[in-house]
Image (cartoon, helix red, strand yellow):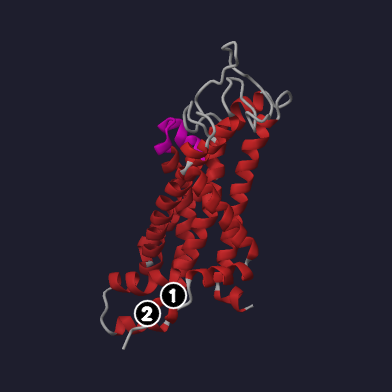
Amino acid sequence: MVPESPRDTAPGIWTRATSLARRKPLGAASALVILVLLVVALLAPLLAPRDPYALNLNERGLPIRMQGPTASFPLGTDPLGRDVLSRIIYGARVSLVVGFASVLIGTVVGTGLGLVSGYWEGQLDYVIQRGVDTTMAIPGIVLALAVMSVLGQSLTNIVLVIALVIAPGASRVVRAAVLAVKQATFVDAAHALGASPARIVSRHVLPNVFAPILVIATVWLGNAIVIEAALSFLGLGTPPPTPTWGAMLSGEGRRNLETAPYLAIFPGVAISVVVLAFNMLGDALRDLLDPQLRSG
């Protein structure tokens, strides 16, 4: 007897994708925007029409400064004669690296703290939560500015700072989910069968709190990009000449806002669209993964 193929026994990826798109069209559109951004960032050397660091010269050998959008430069040039479109394309790389790396680190640390705090409770929970309360009492951007002023400018420091901002909130959400899952019958059954706490947490608790973790990570991707842009805007982000959207807003965009508004408009639109896409995707995932919202 010939075994059935996976295509015959389970819905295909395309079927599931179209079903989700029909249920959450805004979430599907946001996922498409994010996918396009990923492709643009990965293929930046192929898609960027010019070198983002090179000065573009005219026939007399002079930099083409402050030229508005034209056929040769679709988004214009900056005060140094560099192509704005190419710099925005390469800037997507920095935003995605910072976003995904910081969210990954912050979510993993926050999940670990939330699991330990929620499952074992007691004195350990008290100590962890007081540390979380202390950190969350400081506004995220203020904490990021304070740490960056000490550590200095670098891409690694930005990732670590944003992860530090993300971890306390993630741990609080995970702890609440763990406290709810601990009361479930299957956890009591695992206890009765003699399962170790580590096995119960890894095999029974963690899979059942994965949904809020995924939603937190998706929403924080947009927030991480905003924090990176804010740090770059304030001069504490990735050091120049690396193109970043926040630095483009802070430097030439702010200084030439009246004479060349396109220098601020285009990177600002890029930040707004990407952050909105991540937030909309996070809302869609929350609605799809939350049983109460899904049943309603």
Identify the residue position indicated by label 2 in the image. 187
Residue 96, percent from left and from top: 48, 45
Q: Are marks 1 and 2 in contact (CB under 8 Å)?
A: yes
Q: Quadrant of the C terminus?
A: bottom right
**Magenta residue check for 226:** no
Left or right: where 239 falls relative to 119: right
Asked whether the viewer can see residue 73, the reply is yes
Identify the residue position indicated by label 1 in the image. 181
Which corner quadrant of the image does residue 72 belong to? top right
Residue 162, percent from left and from top: 47, 44
Asked whether the viewer can see residue 138, the reply is no
Part of the protein shown in magenta: 143-157
Q: Main secondary structure of the magenta part?
A: helix
Can you name the residue that lies furthest to the top here? 60
Give the amino acid at mark 2.
Val
Q: As rendered, which of 239 and 170 lies closer to the eye?
A: 239
